[in-house]
Image (tube, rainbow, N blue to C red):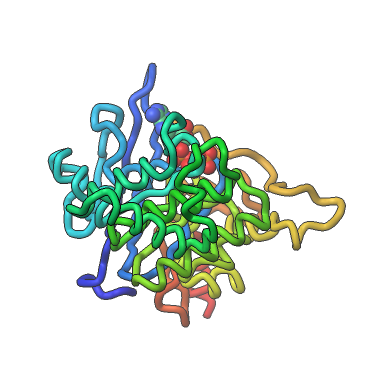
Amino acid sequence: MPDARDMVLDIQHLSVEFPVYGGAVRALDGVTLTIARGETVGVVGESGCGKSVTSLLAMGLLPRQAYRVRSGDISLLGVDVLTAPERELAALRGNRAAMIFQEPLTALNPTRRIGSQMIEVIRRHRRIGKIEARAQAIHLLGEMRVADAGEVLRRYPFELSGGMRQRVLIALAFSGDPAIVIADEPTTALDVTVQRQVLTLLRARARRSGTAVLLITHDMGIVSQYTDRVYVMYAGRVVESGDTRGVLCAPAHPYTRALLGALPERATAKASLNAIPGSVPDLRHPPAGCAYAPRCASAGPLCVDRPPMFPQSGAAERHAACWLLAEERVLA
Ligand SMILES: Nc1ncnc2c1ncn2[C@@H]1O[C@H](COP(=O)(O)OP(=O)(O)OP(=O)(O)O)[C@@H](O)[C@H]1O
């Protein structure tokens, strides 16, 4: 476990719900997630498991009137995100904490050239003139291996390819010298080759500056290639966490195993992708016991109770919320 002093993001026991007509959606249920300086940490799970809500809450980007916190804390670079004034959060965002979204077209202003948008953001971080800021923009694009940076600055967002737009956004995310970048499905809209290029550039850039990255994805292939540690989420809960290699080579939770079985290279011609039988629970009526039990081939009588995160024997940093682990410990 990383040293507490090195922690850039520290989420503890976070339970959050959205009030909806006739009840509430329990989007997060006891989520604990930490990232230390310089780490790249993945959050993986199917659609609706709470990945985006976690990342948006971590950045203080959800309007406070939209949700209720039932329990827990979020500390981002030492700032208590759930109670800090919006002014303080806004100062943190874009400087020491930056976010990269899935669709760069919505993050960029379509009516303004890339250059003027980059210069504006750079000048928000540093008191420099336009000419110096333009040179800085070219430098940042160079770090993203954009060869003809001067030309890119003259273009409008729609004139660039999706991969190039995402490189621009990553360059911008790093312009404030952040300690942490949260990337929410940053390459989902791109084809596989471009995905790899962009993620490789992101990782290299983060490593050079010792920036921590929280990489949100539904893709285990991306987790395996680009993260040091991983949190597997299911129905608003963390069900497994640990070093990526350990989790992927010897997954402890049946849900993690099912997600890995859905990887393209492991799927047989007959088995379709994402073929985990059953569907995710309705979070307006969250299950009392293990949320995965209704879809789990290994479910037994114990699973009517909610499993805590059990440490895995022989792997201090690995945990999984499955009663099978408790049984293994008793039998061992
Ligand atoms: N404003 C909201 N009001 C009500 N429910 C919400 C709201 N925002 C999110 N939710 C619910 O919270 C749960 C978690 O959503 P979230 O967007 O974090 O999932 P996700 O894992 O990021 O999925 P995806 O991969 O599809 O983006 C879902 O059940 C979603 O319907």
Residue 173 makes an appearance in the image: yes
Q: Could you tell me how many numbered marks the image carries?
A: 0
255 left or right of 289 in image:
right
Picture coordinates of residue 79, whole percent (x, y): 17, 53
Q: Is residue 76 left or right of residue 23?
A: left
| Closer to us: 242 or 322 | 242
How far across and down, in percent of the image, does residue 234 sit? 50, 48
Direction from residue 40 to residue 224 in the image, left or right:
right
Residue at 51% across, 68% down? 325
Does 306 sit above or below residue 281? below
In percent of the image, x 36 and y 41: which residue is there?
A: 116
Which is more toward the observer, 207 or 286?
Answer: 207
Residue sticking out furthest to the front: 131
Left or right of 103 in this view: 176: left
Q: Would residue 254 be seen by someone viewing this image from the given angle?
A: no
Q: Position of residue 81 (x, y in %)?
A: 21, 47
* Residue 70 pos. (x, y %): 26, 39
Q: Residue at x 58, y 67 (%)?
A: 224
Please tell me which residue lies in front, 20 or 113. 113
Foreground residue, 175 or 296? 175
Residue depicted at 56% across the width and 43% down the height: 160
Q: Residue furthest right?
A: 269
Above or below for 101 versus 195: above
For ligand 1, the image quadrant comes to top left
Report the quarter where the N terminus lies. bottom left
